[in-house]
Amino acid sequence: MKVRSNMVQKQTSAGGRRTQRNVPAQLNSFNPSVFAEALGRLGGDEELLRELAAILVDDVPPLVDGVQNAIESGDFGEAYRDAHALKGLVVTFDERGCGLLISELMTALKEENSHEIHRLSRSCIDAVENLRSNCKRLLD
């Protein structure tokens, strides 16, 4: 699985600039800080967070299957619709990781850019599955 990182420029004490990597932009394991951000977006409503996590856990598999099947059959319009629904499920929890990857995939689907679609689809699916696993842990 590829991990996306953002590059940041930091000013050194000598006035020069150095480049350093940020934390990976997608989930790799259970990360409570992601849920803290989601909880903040939901006004601190823990019950709502758990309800949305339960919806995500249930609704992700058919949407992922839909995206994969539509891409395999070359129906990029259908893949776009399923990706859009998938993005709606994940952005509450992870707008910068999963949400960003899905947005990039949606752009490639809209442009019918086969190379980018195939390059991005696996990363998106892996990120969404990681988020789904974390949501399952949140519900336990």
Image (spheres, rainbow, N blue to C red):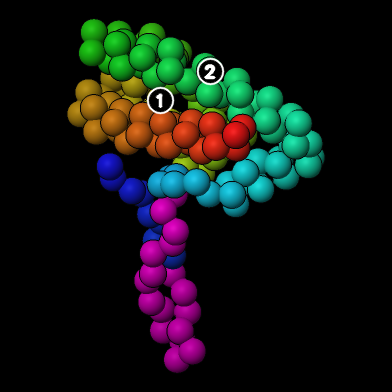
Q: Which mark is residue 86?
A: none
- Residue name at image x 60 percent, y 52 percent: 33
- Residue name at image x 68 percent, y 30 percent: 50
Tell me the quarter of the image containing the C terminus.
Answer: top right
Figure quadrant of residue 106:
top left
Between 31 and 68, the residue placed more toward the observer is: 31
- Residue name at image x 24 percent, y 33 percent: 119
Image coordinates for residue 55, horizontal then vertical, percent: 60, 20
Outermost residue, front side? 140
For residue 102, above or below residue 19: above
Amino acid type of the residue tagged 2 in the rendering: Asp
Q: Residues within 10 Å of mark 2 (few under 14, many from 20)?
A: few
Amino acid type of the residue tagged 1 in the rendering: Met
- Residue name at image x 45 percent, y 91 percent: 14
Q: Answer with left or right where residue 64 lies relative to residue 84.
A: left
For residue 24, above or below residue 71: below
The residue that disc 2 covers is 58
**Magenta-tinted stretch:** 9-25
Q: Answer with left or right where residue 102 lies relative to residue 85.
A: left
Q: What is the C-alpha distance between the residues marked 1 and 2?
A: 22 Å
Figure quadrant of residue 78:
top left
Q: Answer with left or right where residue 55 lies relative to residue 132.
A: right
The residue that disc 1 covers is 106
For residue 64, above or below residue 98: above
